[in-house]
Image: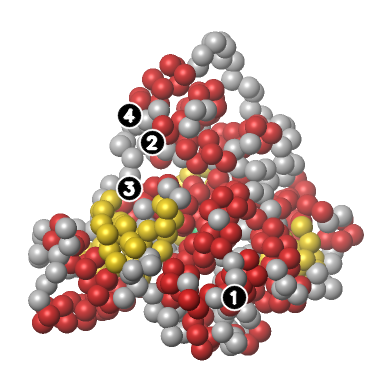
Amino acid sequence: MIFKGDRERLHKLKCTILAAAFLIASLSLAGCFETRSPRTARSQANAEVKPGTPTEASPTPTLTPTPDPKDDAVKLASEVGLTEEDLRGKYDLFIRYAEVVGSNPEFKGRREFIYHLFPVIAEHLKSENEEFFFGKVKELKITQKHTDGIDGQYIQTENKIELDPDLETRMGKEAYSSVFYHELMHFIDLNIAGSGLEGYACLMDDGSIRKHGDLDYGEMRHMKDYLYSYFIEGGAEMYTSEYFTYAPNSYLPRVRFLVGMKYIFGVEKIDNMFFDVDTDYQFAQLLMANGFTTEETVKVFMAMRNTPDALSEPKTLIDPREVLIRLYINNVGPDYEKDKTFCLILGSMNESDLNKIPSDYSKFYTKLSGVSQEDVLQVWGYLTNIVGDYDVQWGFIGLPAPLYLNGELKLAVTAGPTEGNKLDYKAVVVDYDFEKNEIKDITIHEKWSPEPLPDL
Ligand SMILES: [Zn+2]
């Protein structure tokens, strides 16, 4: 069922959507991840437990082994709000995880969020990294701290998540969940395959790119900078959407870049890269294997830096959309201009900041604008109609754009009221025919936060 208004109303709505999209975009959640400066991080790294080394002070839980742990695991799962499907068949692992979660007093009042991470863990934790990762879960700190302009952050060197104490009152319960899950996803990303500091990509004085863990003491003195790509923030937000919220609400161009990477290379390859220990180093290797020179690869990373001034010198950068096009040509074929889905992904990255970066392909991709106005209106009309409260004005954070959910490409967008005190966000997911540019079905996901669990 799709709501369609009359022409005059449609025109009025169009203006409303554009204004609302802008308004909400400025309120977009600012999740963040922080590492120390290279010097501090280096000394921290030396003191850090090496990947996979079980030296964390976490004694192996002394469970009485049972022949089949399934019954116990499923019973325990249902007590904490998970289904049997959420366990992904990893019953022993879940029982062990539950013991670790129960042993960390920092999770008081938030245990339900930590339990709901289990499907992500079950799908990506390798047995050789269990000791290291569970040690990090056991010691994860979660504090409330107000830092200007930041809703939440994960500080890797302290293994600590900080959340803005006013977040829930300011933005609503679902936004709080979305930020918390985003930070927890950083925690998983940076610890699930061993120590992330070891896997960082480093730019050396001579312009080469090396992996931090491969540098000896002498070489470390010649390290100029760490290199960060869209994987860290875009990945945290994209996997938060895939597992918990159904639509992204921050770092949108970065999420879309990664959707484009999945479109070119397949979902599994990009999933494996993100959850591996040396994601950015692998990304650098992938670029160079696809014809990017080392110098060009550094330019790609510089365009993707997680800093406000990252785009201050656009002429020295390479646009992420050019990256996608060149990777497409090299891996799929030359006809990228005829691939409607690919063009929709490129169009959803049309941002004024990125458009300052010169590119041989810019004449093509700056003409693309993502999903059509008519489709946006249909989605907006459906939402307004279903919610049924015409006193509340709804807007989108960004516009509906491609996102993989359960391995299938959909269109997704986060919606929120632009005024009043009904704060909670919703995700609108569109089952879309990308060839015919037609909406097939629309689903709204309203509840992102897990049921609260009683304190132990
Ligand atoms: Zn973040």
Q: Earlier in the sequence, mark 3 or mark 1?
A: 1
Question: Badge 1, how many Cα within 10 Å: few under 14, some, many 20+?
Answer: few
State the separation of the CA atoms marked 4 and 3. Answer: 19 Å
What amino acid is at disc 3?
Trp
Q: Which mark is residue 354?
A: none
Which residue shows up at 25% across the image and 57% down it?
442
Foreground: disc 2 or disc 1? 1
State the image quarter where residue 230 is shown: bottom right
Which residue shows up at 42% across the image and 81% down it?
368
> Element type at marker 2?
helix
What amino acid is at disc 2?
Glu
Question: Badge 3, how many Cα within 10 Å: few under 14, some, many 20+?
Answer: many
Residues at discs 4 and 3 in contact (Cβ within 8 Å)? no
Question: Badge 2, how many Cα within 10 Å: few under 14, some, many 20+?
Answer: many
Which residue shows up at 51% across the image and 65% down it?
260
Q: Indicate if the residue with disc 3 has its beta carbon within 8 Å of ligand 1.
A: no
Find disc 1 in the rendering and name its residue.
334
Foreground: disc 3 or disc 1? 1
Foreground: disc 1 or disc 4? 1
